[in-house]
Image: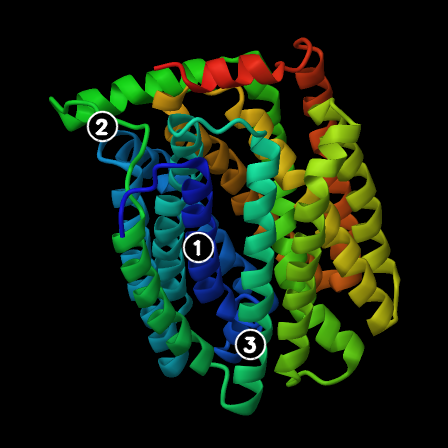
Amino acid sequence: MTTPTTPEQVLRTYITLTVVSTGASSLIWGINTLFLLDAGLSIGKAFLANAFFTAGMVLFEVPTGVVADTVGRRTSYLLGTVTLFATTLLYLLLWQIHAPFVWWAVVSALLGLGFTFFSGATEAWLVDGLHATGYQGSLDAAFAKGQVANGIAMMAGAIGGGFLAQFTNIGVPYVARALLLALTFGVAFRAMWDIGFTPKPRVSVRGEMGEIVRASLQHGLLNPRVRWVMLAGPFTAGVSVYGFYAAQPYLLQLYGHADSYWIAGLSAGIVAGAQIAGGASASYVARIFTDRIMILIGAIVASGTVIALMGLVTSFWMALGLLMLWGTMFAAMSPVRQAYLNSHIPSAQRATVLSSDNLLGSAGGVVIQPALGRSADLWGYGQAYLLTAGIQLFSVPFLLLARRTGKPVEPGAEKALALQP
C-alpha cells in the first residue's frame, strides 16, 4: 500500500488501524473480569491484577513514548501488536493452569507494556499526518470519527467475545484475540507510514531520553494550559476502568445467573454503542460550546451522577440503561480532551507528552482500582460505585484551574502550534 498523501487517506488509515486493533483487543473486554474469577482470583485480586496492568502502563509510558518520538510512530505501533499477541497467549496459559497470583501480576504488567506502545504514538501519527497533508478541519471532528470507529469495533468484538465464550468456553475469545492481533500487525505493516515526522539523529539513548523528557515536561506539566488537564486525568481514568470492568460481575449479579457470559459481552457492547453515540455527538457539542474545559467539567459532573445512580438501583435493566448513559458521556468527553491537549503540544514532543498524560491517568488507576475492588469485596458493588462517583469529582477543581490559565486557543493558533518543530 502506498504512503497516504491526502488528509482523507491519513484519516482512513487511522480509522482502519483503530478498527482492527480495537476489534482484536475487545474480544476479551466484556469477559475479562469473569475470566480472572474463573481462574480462581477473588474480586479484590482481579482488580489488583488490573492494577498491575495499569502499573505496567505507568512504568513504560514515557520510554515507549520516547521510542515513538525517536524511532517512529509506526515502529512503536508494530511493537505494541507483537507484545499484546504474546501476552494474550500467556494470559490463556495462566488461566489453564490456575497460576499463582504473582504470575498474573507479571503478565498483566507486560500487557500494560503492549498498550503503551499504542498510546500517544497513534494519536501523534494521526495529527502529524493530517497537518503534513494540509488538513483544514478541526481535530475534534477527526478524533470523533476515530471514536465512532472505535465504538463500532468494540461493540462487535465485545458482543462477539461474550457469545463465543457462552457457546464454547471462556478461554476461546483469548485465542481469537491472538489471531486477530496477528492480522493487525499485517495491516499496520502495510498501511502505516510515518508522515510529517522525521526521527531525530541518535547519539546516545540516555541523552535522547533526557532531551525528550525535558522537552515533554516543558510542553506538558510545566505548561499551565496542559498541566491541570493532565493532573485531572488520574481521577477520571482511574474510575473509568473500574466502572467498566466491575459492570460485568455486577450486572450478572443483578441478572441472577453468574454463568451468562453473553450478558457480560452485551454490557461491554452497550458501552461501545455509547462510544459511537458520544463520539458522533462530540463535534456538535464542540460547535455549540466553544469552551472545551467547561464541556469536560459538565460531562464529569453529569457522568458522576449517573454512576452513583448505578450503585443505588436494584434493577438489571435500569443498571444497563445507566451504564449506557455513563458510557455516552465519557465517550463524548474523550475527543474534546484529546483535541484540547493536542492543540497545545508541538509535533516533536507530541507522542511523549501524550504518553506522559496517559502515565498520570494510569497512575491513578494503580491506586484506585484495587481500592475500589477491595471495597466491592467488603461492601458490595453498589457501595463501590458510589465511591467511584465521589472520586471522579476530584478532577473538577483541576479543570477549573486550567480554565483560569486564559482563553482557549483559536483554531488558527492551534494549527500553528501543532506545526512547531
Residue type (three-letter) at the residue carrying disc 3 = Gly
Q: Is residue 256 left or right of residue 105?
A: right
Residue type (three-letter) at the residue carrying disc 2 = Pro
Which of the two residues, 17 or 100, is positioned nearer the viewer here?
Answer: 17
Query: Circle 2 is placed at which residue position?
Result: 199
Question: In the rendered image, which quarter is residue 143 located in?
Answer: top right
In the rendered structure, are the residues bearing label 3 and label 2 in contact, judged by CB atoms less than 8 Å apart?
no
Query: Circle 3 is placed at which residue position?
Result: 160
Residue type (three-letter) at the residue carrying disc 1 = Thr
Name the residue located 68 percent from the left edge and 61 percent from the top edge.
Answer: 273
The colour scheme applied to this rendered structure is rainbow
Judge the density around disc 3: few (<14), some (14-19), many (≥20) Cα neighbours within 10 Å: many
Q: Earlier in the sequence, mark 3 or mark 2?
A: 3
SS for dot 1: helix
Name the mark nearer the viewer: 1 or 3: 1
Residue 411, above or below 190? above
Which image quarter is the C terminus in? Answer: top left
Judge the density around disc 2: few (<14), some (14-19), many (≥20) Cα neighbours within 10 Å: some
In the rendered structure, are the residues bearing label 1 and label 3 in contact, judged by CB atoms less than 8 Å apart?
no
How far across and down, in percent of the image, does residue 55 sit?
A: 44, 46
Could you tell me how far apart the alpha carbons at marks 3 and 2 are, in whole angstroms? 39 Å
Mark number, residue 16:
1
Residue 68, above or below 217? below
Which of the two residues, 30 or 282, is positioned nearer the viewer here?
Answer: 282
Whether residue 44 appears in this view of the structure is: no
Q: Is residue 403 left or right of residue 7?
A: right
Q: Earlier in the sequence, mark 2 or mark 1?
A: 1
How far across and down, in percent of the image, does residue 59 sit?
A: 37, 40
Mark number, residue 122:
none
